Amino acid sequence: MIAKYLVYIKLFSCEDLSFAKTSIEPLEISVIRTFIATNNNNTGREDPLEVSIIRSFLPENATLKANFSDPTFKKAYSYVKHAPIFQHFSKDDLYNLIAEIDSWEVPEALQEKFPYYHAGYDYDDRPIWVTEAGKYRLRHITEGGIEKVSLLEKYILKAALRIMKSMQEKDTKEREIRECVFVIDLDGLDIQQFMHVPTISLGQRLTNDYREILADVIGTVLVINANYVGEVGINMIRPLLGHMLEKIEIYGTNRNKWVPVLRRILPLNTIPKWYGGSDKFKPVKVYGTKVPLVISSDKNEFKNFTLSPELLDKGYNFLRRSSAFNDYSKQEIFAILEELETWEAPEYFQRKFPYYHAGFDYDDRPFWISELGKYNMRAVVEKGPEALATFDKYVLQAAFYVLKSIHDRNTDGREVSEVVFLVDYDGLDMYQLTHIPTVTFALRVARIYSDLLQVALGRCIIINANYVGELAVSLLRPILGGILERVEIYGTNKAKWMPVLKKAFPENTLPTPLLQLLEYDGKTQIQGLTKSHGKKGNKTSDFFEYFPPKRTLTALWL
């Protein structure tokens, strides 16, 4: 494929593409144009193809709809009029374009896939905008062809107009706000985006076409959770950014390094809690639904459900962070939560994939245990799609029970928002990792729940991680990204991890000491106890609340 593009670039680098008698699709032509424009520096930047995309946003034979005296329109025009890509448009055209973008209703599916939010204003009254760009799947757009690419470009212009409006709202007669602060979270960015030539080229073209506007708007950019893949992406557009790089600060996945930076630069109440900010954080405006906000729902929304309105709202805000739920309405998610509350998992899954709610740590966070090393996921995968769908549901029910344990711990004076996991890798062997369908399934589950872990995971302690366990973590690393900063991994030497557990979990929070179970010989079969408590002499029922795990592919069982 790459060789194909190189041949076409060679062929067309000295000729206009319109003369080409080839079978290249329009999107591929735009890719070739982008390569030529990039290789020739500034030549070709006002390419007719890119201009025609923008011109297509204007209604045919449109009369002037915009008000030249409107402050928002004037501000937007002041940014776009000098950008080379807009030099092909008259002033009337540009005002009509701004009016069209302003009135355009964004398709819900597009906004769900590319969410962002206005978090507030900094100490200089500059708007703060946050985007979880690492979770954007740009490749899905380019694979959909030129129509979807055009729609995305219109969406980008809509975002730019919203940003300009946020500046205009702080303008006064004495001072005009001309810059913004951007927080760009690259957590979740994976290599699949950079293995697709049209996707890379689209990113380069968009950066190239709008860089004059970017240069004017950008005041400070804070890039966080930039793993190796993120650094590769930044390096690809680095030549196009020029002096803008002086305004960009790039931080890796160690939150201990970038959380203090955010707190130093931004007011605490403008920083989301999951980025080390205030519990009372509330964004000015959210575009998309991946931000976990507390929603004051209409009471009529709850009348057909038995779960409490508070739990339904919390569950909705929790699950909608995952891309698996992008296409579900609030009522559908409520129905899913009700189903998870009452569903009884098959006895096979309860017996083969147990997990436990063990108690609470010193910060009152729920503490859950999973003997993941003994899970035989390969057996489930080999059973086929029906078994996988049931296991998916089992995993999702586990997530629901974890959420409930957080919700039930909240009081009027204190909100608990995180959970702690102890994951025992003892028993994990290469039998699982040498089966490609099993590894693929595990990676898919991790990708679906990574958004939820980003919000809810406070700490995870992995014990008994042998070589196979370390390999499993390495496979998950590109997906989990910055989440791994909250994961502690210990080997099979009990002398090293036992003191950590004793320090992390108070024995007096458990009716029977947790360590009694961890130190026993392991020969006794641990059975699921279905919420049984306090039987004396039983090492598990004294303090474990058992819950059978459940699901992820909601479409298969709703």
Image (tube, rainbow, N blue to C red):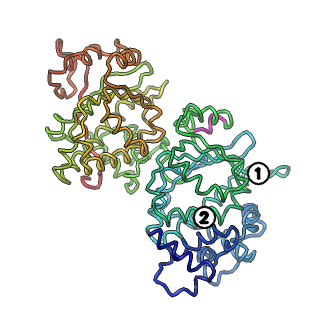
Q: Which residue lies at the image location 51% right of the left edge and 56% below the top edge?
A: 114
Q: Is residue 49 left or right of residue 435?
A: right
Against 320, residue 280 (above or below) is above
Q: Which of 99 and 201 is in front in this view?
A: 201
Q: Which residue lies at the image location 68% right of the left edge and 37% below the top edge?
A: 265
Q: Where is residue 139 in the image (x, y as percent from the top left)?
A: 46, 61
Against 375, residue 15 (above or below) is below
Which element carries disc 2, helix, strand or loop?
A: helix
Amino acid of disc 2: Leu
**Residue for badge 2:** 206
Label 2: few (<14), some (14–19) or many (≥20) C-alpha neighbours in 10 Å: some
Q: Are marks 1 and 2 in contact (CB under 8 Å)?
A: no
Q: Which residue lies at the image location 74% right of the left edge and 77% below the top edge?
A: 90
Q: In this view, does 33 lie to the left or right of 195?
A: right
Against 295, residue 25 (above or below) is below
Q: Position of residue 225 (x, y in %)?
A: 53, 42
Which element carries disc 1, helix, strand or loop?
A: loop
Sequence order check, earlier mark of 1 and 2: 1
**Residue for badge 1:** 177
Amino acid of disc 1: Ile
Disc nearest the viewer among 1 and 2: 2
Quadrant placement of the N terminus? bottom left
What span is colored magenta in the figure?
Answer: 267-271
Q: Which of 68 and 324 is in front in this view?
A: 324
Q: Is residue 526 magenta?
A: no
Q: Residue 292 — which label? A: none
Distance between mark 1 and mark 2 Cα atoms: 25 Å
Q: Where is residue 368 in the image (x, y as percent from the top left)?
A: 32, 28
The outermost residue toward the right is: 174
Q: Nearer the viewer, residue 241 or 15?
A: 15
Provide the major secondary structure of the magenta segment.
helix
